[in-house]
Image (cartoon, grey):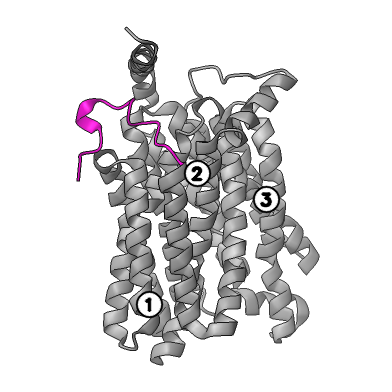
C-alpha cells in the first residue's frame, strides 16, 4: 500500500471512530446553536430602523448630522468586534469552545441590558460595542462547535440552519417593529425582543450544547498558538478560502441598498419597498436551509462556485431592467440560488484546518466583518459615481472574483473523507 493510500485509509478510520462520539451530541444541539446564534443579532435594528428615534432621544433632533452620529454604532461595534476576533483566535486554542460560546451570549446580553438602560449616547455606544464582542464570539464558536460535535455529513445542514436562522431573526425583528414598535420606542423593543430572546439563547447555549468530547489540540504553550495560525495563513487553501469569503461578503452587500434601489428605480412607496425586502430575506432563509441539504450531493466547493456564478450573472440584467416585476422575479430567484452558497461557504471553511477550527472561524468572522464594511464602501462609491447600474455590476464582478479564487486556489478536503454515497456526483 502506497503512502497516499495509507493516509486516506487512516483518515477514513479516524472519521469512523469519531462518528459514534459525534453522533451522540444530541438532537438539541443544532436547534440550541441556532437559537443562541440568532439571539446575538437582535440589536442590529438599533443601527438601522431606530436611527432617528435614538437621535431624538439623546440629541433632541432627527437632523441628518445626529442620525449619522448614531449610525456609527454599527461602525464602532464592528471595529471593536474585529479586534476582539483576533484575540478570540488565540483564546480558542486555550479554552473550550462551549465556554467561549456561553461567554459570547452572556456578553451580548450584558450589552443589550446596558443599551436598554443607557442614559446617554456614549453609554449606548459602549454597551453596543460590548454586544459586538459577544456577537463575534458566539458566531465563531457556533460554527466551530458544528465542526467538533457533528459528523462530516451532518455539518452542512447545521450550517444551513445557522445561516438561515440569523436572517430569519432579522425578518422577525422587522415584522415586530412594523406591528408593535412603529412609534420608534427602541427601549421597549429591547425589553420585549432582544432581552427575552437572549435569555433563551443563553439557556440553550449552556444546557443544549455539550462540550467537545475530544481535547482541543495544543491547549498550552507558545508553539501551540503559533501552529494554530500557521495552519491557516501559511497554507494556500485555507488562506485563499478566507480571502474568497471576504470578497464574497463584500459582493453581497448590495442588498443593503435594496429598499433604496426599488424606491428610486421603480418609484415604489417605501412601505412596499420594505415588504419587497422582507420577501428577499425570506427567500434567502429558505435558500440557505435548502442549500445545507444539497451540499453533500453537489460538493462544498462546487456548490459555492455555482451559486456565486449564477447570483453574479443574475445581477447583470437587473442593472439594466426597468420593469419592477421582472426585476423582483430575478432578484428573488438569484437570492434563493445565491443563498445556497452560505452553507457551502461555511462548510468549506470549517474543513480547511480541522485542528484549528476555533482560530479559523474567529479569523473568518473578522474578515467577513471587514468584507461587509468594504462592500458598503465600494458599493457606496459605485453608487455615487455610476448610479445603481454601477452598484449592481460591481457586486456581480466581486461575486465572480470570489468564484475564481475558490475555483483555482481553494481545495475541498472533504471529497476524500466522505463515503462514496455522499461524494459529489459528476454533472
x, y (%) of residue 3?
A: 39, 11
Question: Dot 2, how many residues are within 10 Å of its Cα: few (below 14), some (14-19), or many (20+)?
Answer: many
The residue nearer to you, when weighing 411 against 158, is 411
Query: What residue sits right under mark 1 in the picture?
Result: 275
Q: Is residue 412 magenta?
A: yes
Report helix, strand or loop for mark 3.
Answer: helix
The answer to whether residue 169 of the structure is visible from this angle is: no
Q: Give the residue at x 45% y 41%.
A: 410
Q: Earlier in the sequence, mark 1 or mark 3?
A: 3
Residue drawn 56% across and 33% down? Answer: 235
Circle 1 sits in a helix, a strand or a loop, which is it?
Answer: helix
In the orientation shown, which residue stands out farthest toward the top?
A: 1
Tell me the mark number nearer the camera, choosing from 1 and 3: 3
Gap between marks 1 and 3 measured at Cα: 31 Å
Residue 129, x across and y down, in percent: 71, 55
- Does 164 sit left or right of 102 as displayed? left
Tell me which label, 2 or 3, sits earlier in the chain. 3
Residue 75 against residue 17 in the figure, above or below: below
Residue 268: which quarter of the image? bottom left
Alpha-carbon distance for marks 2 and 3?
21 Å
Query: Could you tell whether 43 is left or right of 88 in the image?
Result: left
The one of 8 and 158 positioned closer to us in this rendering: 8
Q: Which residue is mark 2?
A: 241
Q: Is residue 387 above or below residue 316?
A: below
Residue name at image x 24 percent, y 40 percent: 297
Relative to 115, residue 216 above or below: above
Chain part drawn in magenta: 410-427
Measure the alpha-carbon separation of dots 2 and 1.
34 Å
359 lies left or right of 299: right
* Residue 364 in view: yes
Q: Is residue 233 left or right of residue 285?
A: right
352 inside magenta stretch: no
Amino acid at each position: 500500500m502506497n503512502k497516499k493510500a495509507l493516509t486516506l485509509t487512516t483518515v477514513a478510520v479516524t472519521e469512523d471512530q469519531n462518528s459514534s462520539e459525534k453522533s451522540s451530541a444530541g438532537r438539541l444541539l443544532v436547534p440550541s446553536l441556532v437559537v443562541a446564534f440568532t439571539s446575538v443579532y437582535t440589536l442590529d435594528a438599533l443601527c438601522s430602523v431606530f436611527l432617528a428615534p435614538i437621535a431624538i432621544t439623546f440629541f433632541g433632533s432627527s437632523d441628518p448630522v445626529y442620525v449619522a452620529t448614531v449610525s456609527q454604532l454599527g461602525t464602532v461595534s464592528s471595529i471593536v468586534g474585529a479586534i476582539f476576533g483576533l484575540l478570540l483566535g488565540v483564546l480558542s486554542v486555550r479554552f473550550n469552545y462551549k465556554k467561549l460560546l456561553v461567554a459570547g451570549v452572556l456578553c451580548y446580553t450584558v450589552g443589550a441590558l446596558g443599551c436598554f438602560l443607557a442614559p446617554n449616547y456614549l453609554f449606548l455606544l459602549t454597551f453596543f460595542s460590548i454586544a459586538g464582542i459577544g456577537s463575534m464570539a458566539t458566531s465563531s464558536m457556533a460554527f466551530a462547535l458544528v465542526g467538533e460535535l457533528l459528523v462530516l455529513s451532518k455539518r452542512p445542514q447545521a450550517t444551513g440552519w445557522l445561516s438561515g436562522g440569523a436572517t430569519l431573526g432579522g425578518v422577525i425583528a422587522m415584522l415586530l417593529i412594523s406591528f408593535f414598535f412603529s412609534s420608534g420606542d427602541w427601549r421597549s423593543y429591547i425589553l420585549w425582543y432582544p432581552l427575552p430572546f437572549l435569555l433563551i439563547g443563553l439557556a440553550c447555549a449552556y444546557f443544549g450544547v455539550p462540550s467537545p468530547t475530544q481535547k482541543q489540540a495544543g491547549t498550552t504553550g507558545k508553539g501551540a498558538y503559533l501552529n494554530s495560525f500557521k495552519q491557516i495563513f501559511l497554507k494556500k487553501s485555507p488562506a485563499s478560502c478566507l480571502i474568497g469569503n471576504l470578497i464574497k461578503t463584500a459582493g453581497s452587500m448590495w442588498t443593503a441598498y435594496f429598499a433604496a434601489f426599488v424606491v428610486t428605480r421603480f418609484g415604489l412607496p417605501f412601505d412596499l419597498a420594505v415588504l419587497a425586502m422582507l420577501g428577499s430575506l425570506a427567500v434567502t432563509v429558505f435558500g440557505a436551509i435548502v442549500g445545507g441539504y444539497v451540499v453533500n450531493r453537489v460538493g462544498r466547493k462546487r456548490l459555492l462556485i455555482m451559486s456565486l456564478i449564477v447570483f453574479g450573472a443574475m445581477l447583470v440584467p437587473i442593472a439594466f431592467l426597468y420593469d419592477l416585476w421582472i426585476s423582483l422575479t430575478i432578484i428573488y430567484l438569484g437570492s434563493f440560488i445565491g443563498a445556497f452558497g452560505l452553507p457551502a461557504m461555511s462548510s468549506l471553511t470549517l474543513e480547511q484546518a480541522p485542528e484549528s477550527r476555533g482560530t479559523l472561524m474567529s479569523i473568518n468572522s473578522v474578515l467577513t466583518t471587514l468584507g461587509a464594511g468594504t462592500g458598503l464602501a465600494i458599493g457606496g462609491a459605485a453608487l455615487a459615481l455610476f448610479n445603481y447600474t454601477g452598484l449592481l455590476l460591481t457586486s456581480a464582478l466581486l461575486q465572480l472574483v470570489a468564484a475564481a479564487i475558490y475555483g483555482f486556489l481553494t481545495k475541498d478536503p472533504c471529497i476524500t473523507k466522505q463515503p462514496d454515497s455522499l461524494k459529489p456526483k459528476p454533472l
